[in-house]
Image: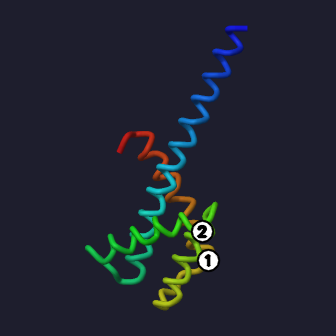
Amino acid sequence: MSGFDDRKKAQEGKFAHDQETLFKATARRNKLLGLWAADKMGLSGEAAEAYAKEVVKADFEEKGDEDVFRKVKGDLDAKNAGVSEHQIRREMETLLQTALEQVKAGQ
């Protein structure tokens, strides 16, 4: 019975670690996405950093990525940046992989 309990604890620990890693990576992805979108809108420096923080905050509106997508899409459309829905979603996927690698590397 002890072996089973040990495996169960290990699985629970791994699950918690994986969830924490995903949370950190998603927040980092959102910041990177905000900086990417800021560049598309012609923002730089402090304005770009401030916009990236807004994108990170947008993720707390609802579960999933749609709140972040809507924010970025709406802002890009308002600035007539000419970025398609597909481009945004592709960038979100790419940046999540980048963020995961960075979080796992301890950056």
Q: Is residue 16 left or right of residue 50?
A: right
Q: Residues within 10 Å of mark 2 (few under 14, many from 20)?
A: some
Q: Which residue is mark 1?
A: 85
Residue 83's x, y, as percent? 53, 81
Residue 72's x, y, as percent? 52, 76
Report the residue at 59% width, 76% height from top.
70
Q: Is residue 33 left or right of residue 9?
A: left
Q: Which residue is mark 2?
A: 89
Q: Is residue 49 left or right of residue 27?
A: left
Report the residue at 68% width, 15% height from top.
5
Q: Look at the numbered disc 2 and give the secondary structure of its residue.
A: helix
Report the residue at 35% width, 83% height from top.
42
Residue 28's x, y, as percent? 44, 56
Amino acid type at mark 2: Arg
User: Which residue occupies the extreme left position in the image?
Assistant: 45
- CA separation, marks 2 and 1? 6 Å
Above or below, comparing residue 101 to residue 47 in the picture: above
Residue 97's x, y, as percent? 52, 52
Amino acid type at mark 1: Glu
Question: Residue 8 appears in which quarter of the rendering?
Answer: top right
Name the mark on residue 38.
none
Q: CB under 8 Å between callouts 2 and 1?
A: yes
Image quadrant occupied by the C terminus = top left
Q: Residues within 10 Å of mark 1 (few under 14, many from 20)?
A: few
Image quadrant occupied by the N terminus = top right
Q: Look at the numbered disc 1 and give the secondary structure of its residue.
A: helix
Q: How is the image coloured?
A: rainbow
Tally the numbered discs: 2
Report the residue at 68% width, 8% height from top.
2
